[in-house]
Image (spheres, helix red, strand yellow):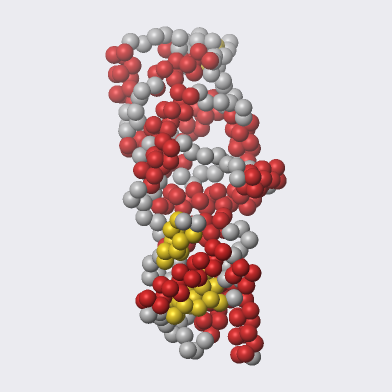
Amino acid sequence: MTKFCECGCGKEIKEYRRFVRGHNWRGKLLSLGTRKRISESMKGRKRSEETKKRISEELKGRKRSLESRKKQSETLTGRKQSEETIRKRVEKIRGRKQSEEHIRKRVEKRRGRKQSEEHIRKRVEKRRGKKHSLKTRKRMSESQKERYENDENHPWRKKENIRKRVESRKEGKGYKHSLETRKRISESRKGIIFTEEHRKNMSIAANNAINPRYNSGYFYSKKMQKEIFYQSGLELRALEMFEKDASIWSIERYNLGSIKYKMNGNYHSYSPDYILNKKIVYEVKPKWMLKDEIVLAKIRAGKRYCKEKGLEFRVLTERDLKEKEQSKK
């Protein structure tokens, strides 16, 4: 005659037993002292791989009731994990990749769910002042780049989103932070030291945002053994010409301080483009821009400043570059 566990789980047991091991406690409420004693006795005990596999199989497909989840949530609320526990958990999941199916299910489950204002506030307060390590920032950057390149549905790549961004830029619209938010961002960024590569990327991005028509980047000068920043294709051509010219032994971005000029009753600052051989200051501009009043005011101020300092001021246009390139041929 087959005998089953008396807890109602439906598992077969031997004739001389009443329960499967541990099932006699099901449904019973243990006192705090008993639970603490059981917890102490279980500390340090490790389950075998076979036991863990069996437990995993038993729990598959089992769904906890809403009441059970609520009780567990209340029990864990306010409990803080030790640094050792957090470290072990992080080490365990490090390098583990979720399957596409698992990611899809998780996304579908969270779609449309909105976090409460209280939850968002707590999350922000918890992370305030925390800084990611350089290794973590690099890993996050790489994962976002990979996602952008491989995911056709990435928000940045959707045509509708791109169209909206372009239109908002044309109209001068965009999200503006409040004065308080800007102040907080400023305070949080004080003391941050950016790498040379990061500063270069920011400089190029800022220039492209201001002048989207022009190309900007860095030109490597063999004479100077370093990279020199340029803000347009015309400046790049000028740097290439300077590099080939044997009479030029020093090429630098202008670094002697800003030049003041007056326009419409107000004073403004201006910096030329390059200084060659420590004494020749160059302003690189297209020919059509020399008719602009602001550009002419800058050039006049530049000539006056250089004369006072014993320097030579020159303006270089695309026509001048073409003439010099042809003369060398």
The image shows residue 155 at horizontal and vertical percentages of: 63, 43
User: Vertical placement of 222 versus 187: above or below?
Assistant: below
| Residue closest to the eye, 282 or 69 | 282
Residue 218 visible to an observer of this rendering: no
Residue furthest toward the front?
Answer: 265
Residue located 57% across and 55% down the image: 209
User: Vertical placement of 259 versus 34: above or below?
Assistant: below
The image shows residue 207 at horizontal and vertical percentages of: 53, 59
Res 85 → quadrant: top left
The image shows residue 271 at horizontal and vertical percentages of: 45, 66
How many numbered badges does the structure rendering display?
0
Looking at the rendering, in which quadrant would you find the N terminus? top right
Looking at the rendering, in which quadrant would you find the C terminus? bottom right
Residue located 37% across and 76% down the image: 308
User: Vertical placement of 199 versus 182: above or below?
Assistant: below
The image shows residue 158 at horizontal and vertical percentages of: 68, 44
| Residue closest to the eye, 96 or 295 | 295
Residue located 33% across and 22% down the image: 39
| Residue closest to the eye, 176 or 44 | 176
Res 29 → quadrant: top left
Residue 10 visible to an observer of this rendering: yes
Residue located 60% across and 85% down the image: 324
